[in-house]
Amino acid sequence: MSAVMFRVQCVNSFLRRLLHGGPGHRDQVLEQLRVCSAEDQVFDVVGKNKAKLTVNHVSKAVGMLWQFQKEKPQMLRTVELIKRHPQFLTLRVLAENKIVLMDDVMLVDILYSFLRLNMDQHDSLVQQLVSEAWLRIDRLPMESLSKFSICLSDQHLQHSPLMGHITSIVDQRLSSIDDARVLTALMICVSSLVSPRLRDALIIRADHLLETMDPSNYNNPRRVVQFLRNVKHSYRPLLEKCNRIILRNIPRLDAENIGIILGLYQSLQFNNCDFRLAVKQRLTELIDSSIDPFSFTKLFVALVPMASQELKDGLENTALLLADELSAHQALAVAEALEETQSRNLSLINKIASVIQRNIHAYKPVEVARITQALFLMQYQNPQLFTKLRNILVKFLERSFYPYEVTMLTRVLSMLPCPRLDEGVISRVDAVVPQCNLNDLNTISHAVAKWVRNDPSFRHNTPSKYVRLLQSLNRCGHERLRTSDRLDLLLEELKYISGEWFEEMLLEETMVTLKRMMDQIQWTNVPELALFLTRINHLCPPLMDLIASVAIKDIDKIHHSATYAILLPFSVMNYDSEQVDELYDVCVKRFVPHISSFDPHLLVLLGYLLSMADCFPEELVRQIFSIDFLGKLDSQLETLPDALNMRTRLRLMELNRAVCLECPELQVPWFHERYCQQLQNKGNGKVSPVQQQIHKILGEVLGGINFARVAVVTPYFYTVDFECTLDTRLLPLPYSESSTLQISDRGQVHWAKSSVENIRDVLPPGAQRVAVDFLDSKSFCKNSPHMKGEALMRKRHLEILGYRVVQIPHFEWNSMELSTPDAWKEYLKKNIFRERSS
């Protein structure tokens, strides 16, 4: 019996040690590592137990080293010190020797931690870990596969066959991914390799997982936005969902994350009023705690473009105090922010330029280009520095072979004065041109045009080196268009393209290509196509009819905000057809239920766009001219770039004028009198040579210069080129000298007080006012004499104000038919003295 009891006690003792980690089976090294609270303690454990370290110990130690670094602010991290520690080499050697003993998860975790500790990607350990992970790739758990893809991206292997293999696995196992963090990391890593089908599948999966994840995790939606930026796909429903999650997390965001998100939104052309107002407030709260160069630079770059002048001055003063402590890349970021806001703080600009000059050796080619551009656009005066920058740019360009890099270096070089261009530069550009997309080709053409104009030998003839390069550009552009077979990719290349070279050399071929791809036009790309046609001001009825047809058919699939882009060419170019009225109806029905979710500035632009087409939805008008909306618009305008701010204010005034004139029953007040007076005072009053010519001939036709008024400001502040008054017998009536403005010898009109205050003479019974307007090329489509919507709306409004409007198109006035003074006189007589239409 005692023997049995003894055996039972032994078994129980063994079980207790097994279950509770008795002293005989405790991993003392692992326990020592677990209680470490700093890197030195980890290294101390490693140093004392070198002979005992297992693969688990190595994995734990390396993971803890990265974890300690991760928890520190960027500026306090000591990665380089860690890498120089003798025991770090011990861990590195042991890891390399124990690769075959690592399980799949451990293998990827160790690779991830070593790379985060800035281990060189060419190190034999890193290469062996990558090779081993590749062998096991098909069995890696999705979380490890996600981490492994990040490791490959860190090594710039986004386009490698290995990443292609991962993309294929993601495609096959997408429905099994239930962790938003795992999915979003994979989405970013494979973004350069996804097909349109997989892109859409990833978007659907991400949309679903964002609903199920912890809403306090802002990194997941941020990565989704980054994916959309990478694939150049501004999918609004998902963008708005991400934005809502990010907005809830604004109080937890630091300046660095805010800056990243602002940059992503800008790339996607996603303007959200609530986000900008919230981050402006958050960034303002962070000012007092952003006292080190790293955090202050992030804050400065994000906040300065949307700050008030008083706040901007304070930030610039702080930047001046911290300037000497800035790193090379922090100085570059500050310089670009100063250029973006058109700063005139010479002390700060000079200080930042000196920091840049001191660190010039640390910059990469594109960074030197960005520096040069920022300093040049700020009109920084330092010829010696610009000469140095030019020489560096030339050296970089002569040995660069990346198309995007060559394009940017070429563009920035062309900004600088250059008496003679190096043959090596031309040769390098010529060699890279066949690899360039249409936007790059267009950018290079602008640079070549500048070089040609600035070359001293251009006075005699165009040097052959430029001729050859221009021929290459033309040939490659035409070839790219002829071989293009995907409309979405073509529209992406055409997104920002403009200028003489494109219009003269490629526009006709581009329109042929677009017509060839008409079968690819669908609801997903009609907004981009409509924007392109508007930007190039090219009236193409077959394409516009198809845009209208597709939009009408699939309007429920189109995001409500995209109705603005779709309607743009129809309103701007005043295009009408059987379908256009129906298109306006379906677009209005699509966006009206969502009026409250529009960004204020976009709603104003949409309202103005519709007013050009004589379309005034009551719900839209009442929303825009409500007190609450105008207050929100004012707040938003303070955060927008100056150009968009001024454009929105102008469009609001023009919409206000249109509603007052065309919809008096809506009882919207005219509240832009002072704004218009300010615009009038800022105007230069310059009259073109053609207008001066018309003014002279008009005096002869009417019987004296006092029978015509020039630059007449009407009620609601239209400026009419010339005004005359005819009585019931169509005879001109003279104006008093005090109400007649004349053109000076230098073509200037000096505004009289009476003109600005809209004082109008009382007309005799039966008399009529005649407005004579010269319409230059801006009032017509590029490829036809078709009058645009703005000129037509102006005519409509002047007629409401009581004018009979005579419009003189530039192509009629400058035609061969009207090439003599007598012909011009006859033309004016025929148009001015015709009977009033019934």
Image (spheres, rainbow, N blue to C red):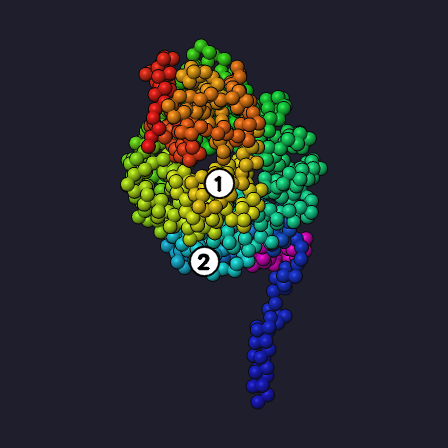
Q: How far apart are marks 2 and 1 (CA)?
A: 44 Å
Residue 389 coordinates in the image, percent (x, y): 58, 25
- The answer to which image quadrant residue 501 occupies is top left
- Residue located at (45% from left, 18% from top): 695
**Disc 1 residue crowd, few under 14, some 14–19, many 20+, Cα 10 Å:** many
Q: From the viewer's perspective, is residue 183 above or below residue 518?
A: below
Residue 209 got which mark? 2
Which residue type does callout 2 highlight?
A: Leu
Residue 653 coordinates in the image, percent (x, y): 50, 38
Q: From the viewer's perspective, is residue 271 above or below residue 448?
A: below
Residue 656 got which mark? 1
Q: What stretch is highlighted in magenta?
A: 40-63
- Whether the magenta-drawn stretch holds residue 54 is answered as yes
Secondary structure under tag 2 reads helix
Label 2 vs 1, first from the N-terminus: 2
- From the image, which quarter does the C terminus lie in? top left
